[in-house]
Image (tube, grey):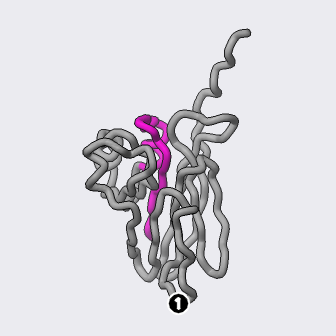
Amino acid sequence: MRRIGLISDTHDLLRPEAKAVLAGCEHIIHAGDITVAQVIDELASLAPVTAVRGNNDRDAWALDLAEVEMLHFDQVSLYVIHDLAQLDQLPPSSPVRVVISGHSHKPSIRETDGVLHVNPGSAGRRRFTLPVTVGELLIDGDQVSARIIELAVAPPKRKKS
């Protein structure tokens, strides 16, 4: 069984809680909005990393990142893109079994027409009332499952009025 870590929208903050969950993964996928190269370097100390460029990845270091990536683990093909709205419809004959995206900061797992869509949410600074999360894929041959893991981080401080 392969364990693939999923992370997105760190926005230059790689939390120790995220690193702890991703430790032990065979591979880590970052679905964009990294904003600083050091995040990839830190993740690479845990496992090999594949990252795509998000809309906030604008500095020179990010030019080396592709906007989409295709990966294969066992008999499962993964398609990685930052903003799902940028994805043209996959053709019915597409070998893609999993689409991984970020951008919305909203963690989700849904299956449509045999394709598993996973957004690990945001592992960076909390936005609005959304949880701080990462995800994982478990792959065994041609079988794949996904889960979202909420990180135990302090709640945002309320502004005094």
Up-down relation of residue 139 to residue 19 (above or below): below
Q: Nearer the viewer, residue 152 or 98?
A: 98
Vertical placement of residue 92 versus 131, above or below: below
Tell me the amino acid under the disc marked 1: Ser
Can you name the residue that lies furthest to the bottom here? 93
Residue at 46% from the left image edge and 56% from the top image edge: 5
Q: Quadrant of the C terminus?
A: top right
- Judging depth in this view, the residue of 4 and 131 nearest the camera is 131
Residue receiving disc 1:
93
Left or right of residue 126: residue 31? left
Decide which of 86, 11 is in the foreground and name it: 86
Q: Quadrant of residue 38?
A: top left
Horizontal and vertical percent for residue 142? 50, 82
User: Badge 1: how crowded within 10 Å, few (<14), some, or many (20+)?
Assistant: few
In percent of width and height, residue 124 lies at: 50, 38
Please name the residue shown 48% across and 51% down the image. Answer: 7
Q: Residue at x 55, y 45 (%)?
A: 122
Specify whether residue 35 is painted magenta: no
Q: In the image, what residue occupies the spot 28% across and 44% down?
A: 41
Residue 5 in magenta stretch: yes
Residue 155 percent coordinates (x, y): 64, 27
Boundaries of the magenta span: 1-22
- Locate residue 117, reporting x and y percent: 59, 67
- Above or below 133: residue 47: below
Callout 1: SS: loop
